[in-house]
Amino acid sequence: MPRTLTRRRTAASTEAYTPADEPEDSNLPDDDEDDQPRRGSRRGSRRDSLHTEEAPASRRSRRSQEDDDEDDEPAPKVGGKGWGSYEKTKSATSSFPENFKVTGEAVVVKILDEEPFLVFLQHWIERKGKRSWTCLESRCPLCDDAGDKPSQQVCFNVVDFTDPDDPQIKIWQFGPMVADILKNYSKDKKTAPINRDDLYFSVSKQTKNNKTTYYITPVKERDLADDWDIEPLSEEDLEEFDDKAYDEDVLQVNTRNELKTIAREILND
């Protein structure tokens, strides 16, 4: 029986998460969907903690000599050219979670959560600048004053294999259409739980006549190499990505006064 990792939920960033300010589909916010360490396992970390005695002085001396030798080596090659280098360094330097974007081209993802790590209501306001706002649910000015109806948003941590050689952890945010598909998979004994180690998914979408259809298909680990030219994640890889996983603390919530300002802006248009 496939093993399911018991994952420790940790925030990967102290910055607040702001949902993307560009909808993936032009017909939002109607019924179609909206459309980011240390290497090694926690088992290795625990081993280190159990053996805390100091290394012999001679070993420390050898380590010091090795460090000195490394300092004398030529500087490593850094930097690069092209948009690929731009995207790689952009991801490495950003302190904000990155959203996984579904496109017309099928991409493999590894879902890290057994169920959504975050579910919230979101207002989408067509305006210059920031357009997505988290609903306060109770006494929300965008609901009560502006009369805007929020949409349900669901978030999962996923590993994105758009670049099979450089998989990245991202937040996959979507609405009820995709949520219902994943919920059905989570209840099917052939694909439950959806974050089990040997299960991946291919994801794509097609938009026609302002209607978007999502295609989410299970991919078995054994088929990754032949069908997708992707190397499956090892147990150590999974634990490393799990250590980077986001939790509900990443959600940005504006104050009621800030939302009142947006509501007045809507009413004055």
Image (cartoon, rainbow, N blue to C red):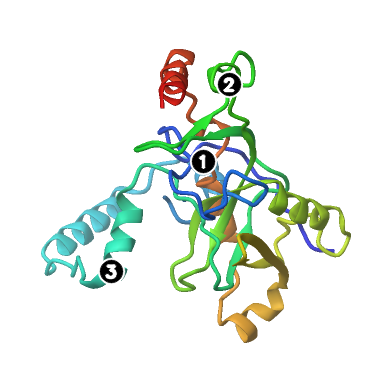
Q: Name the kind of residue labelled 1 in the image.
A: Ser
Which of 136 and 80 lies nearest the eye of the viewer? 136
**Residue in the picture at 60% in, 64% down:** 109
Left or right of 8, for residue 83: left
Rendered image: mark on residue 83: 3
Provide the secondary structure element on which disc 1 rests.
Answer: helix
Mark 1 or 3, closer to the camera: 3
What amino acid type is highlighted by mark number 3?
Answer: Trp
Q: Is residue 136 visible?
A: yes
Q: Nearer the viewer, residue 147 or 197?
A: 147
Q: Residue 102, percent across and down?
A: 55, 61
Q: What element carries label 2?
A: loop
Look at the picture and state if 35 lies above or below 250: below
Q: In which quarter of the image is residue 195?
A: bottom right
**Element under label 3?**
helix
Quadrant of the drawing holding the N terminus = bottom right
* Lower position in the chain sequence, tag 3 or tag 2: 3
Sequence-first tag of 2 and 1: 1
